[in-house]
Amino acid sequence: MKTYSLTNRHALKGAQRSMKMPHVIPDSIRNPGRHSGEGRNKDWIAAPGSRSGTGCAAMTIYFHINRIVKAGIGCLFATLILFPFPGSAANWHLSLYTGQWDDAPLGRVLAGKANLRQAYIGALALGREIWRSSKGAASLELEGQLVGNWGREIYEDEDPSSGDPGWDWAPGMSHASQNSGSHFHWETNLALVGRWHKFPWNRYLQTSFSLGDGISYAAKLPPYEVDPHGQLHGEQHAEVHTKRVLNYLLIELSVTRPEIAPWSVFFRIHHRSGVFGLIDDVDLGSDFVCLGVRYDFSLDNF
């Protein structure tokens, strides 16, 4: 039987509904597990339900892994809430922050060399202190986040073939397709955060610096992590790729004053990446520069 890409399968299903044809299951689909670059998605595996090879099992495993990752994040977050970790008197915090995508490598972001683009996040985070040193200089926290992401569906491609008029466009694409469309997806993150509390100026401005690392799960592939060249000219031309499950990193500077405690304000870098290819050969990432507010509290007060 003739093979179909996932896009063509959607078109086929629409035609079947309109013509009242019997449901057709293709023998094979493009392999979603292939990496980007030369040769991407040029091989085929058996479609789920086709009973034509081991591809069905591979796809089944792929979907089960996604479910396991989501369930794992949920279990870890439940542990964050329920397990009786010893901590300080105000050992919980609730944070609200928002940020904008900085399309620059992490090193340039840290150096303040911003390249802000049209993608944004809004995040609600719940954290709990699980350890503090005897002198109170350092602490460890667990933090879970629910993040809304919105922005463009397709971003600008700097390759000459995407100029005006350009050439070799994918069906339905043109120069005007860049920086167009709208997108929204949810993201969940869970991180272990180390925080340093002791600074010589704390009597004037109480300061803490934190560094956290964990896991990030995006409900959809973020367009700002997708190669626009592949979107505009076909996936076989994409030079980089991303995944829904990546590493999560946060870098934060928080300040407060006794007059506003237990409130504090903070600056945070919100980062997703494949850790230089360690995760499924993903060698890119995304950074958001963020501002937020935090409220520290203890359940003993409720």
Image (cartoon, helix red, strand yellow):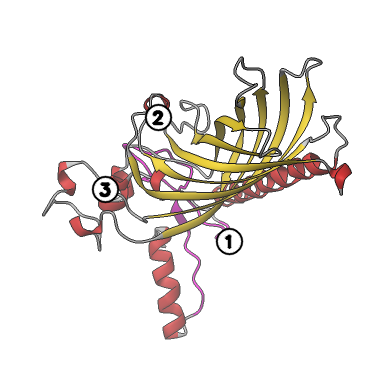
Q: Which amino acid type is marked by label 3?
A: Glu
Residue drawn at point x = 81 percent, y = 16 percent: 134
- Residue 31 relative to residue 62: left or right: left
* Residue labelled with disc 3: 156
- Residue 171 relative to residue 274: left or right: left
* Residue labelled with disc 2: 109
Q: Which amino acid type is marked by label 2?
A: Val
Q: Position of residue 26 (x, y in %)?
A: 47, 63
Local SS, label 1: loop
- Residue 219 relative to residue 11: left or right: right
Above or below: residue 264 compared with residue 134: below
* Residue labelled with disc 1: 49
Residue drawn at point x = 79 percent, y = 30 percent: 130
- Total tally of numbered discs in the picture: 3
User: Magenta span covers which residues?
Assistant: 22-51
For the N terminus, the quadrant is bottom left
Q: How far apart are marks 3 and 1 (CA)?
A: 38 Å
Task: Check whether the beta carbons of the residues at disc 2 and disc 1 lie within 8 A of each other.
Answer: no
Above or below: residue 52 compared with residue 209: below
Neighbor class of circle 3 (other Cα within 10 Å; few <14, some 14-19, many 20+) is some
Q: Where is residue 78 in the image (x, y as percent from the top left)?
A: 79, 45
Which quadrant of the figure has residue 15?
bottom left
Q: Which amino acid type is marked by label 1?
A: Gly
Local SS, label 2: helix
Q: Which of marks 3 and 1 is nearer the N terminus?
A: 1
Q: Position of residue 110 (x, y in %)?
A: 43, 26
Q: Nearer the viewer, residue 294 or 148?
A: 294
Residue 174 in view in this figure: no
Residue drawn at point x = 14 percent, y = 51 percent: 167
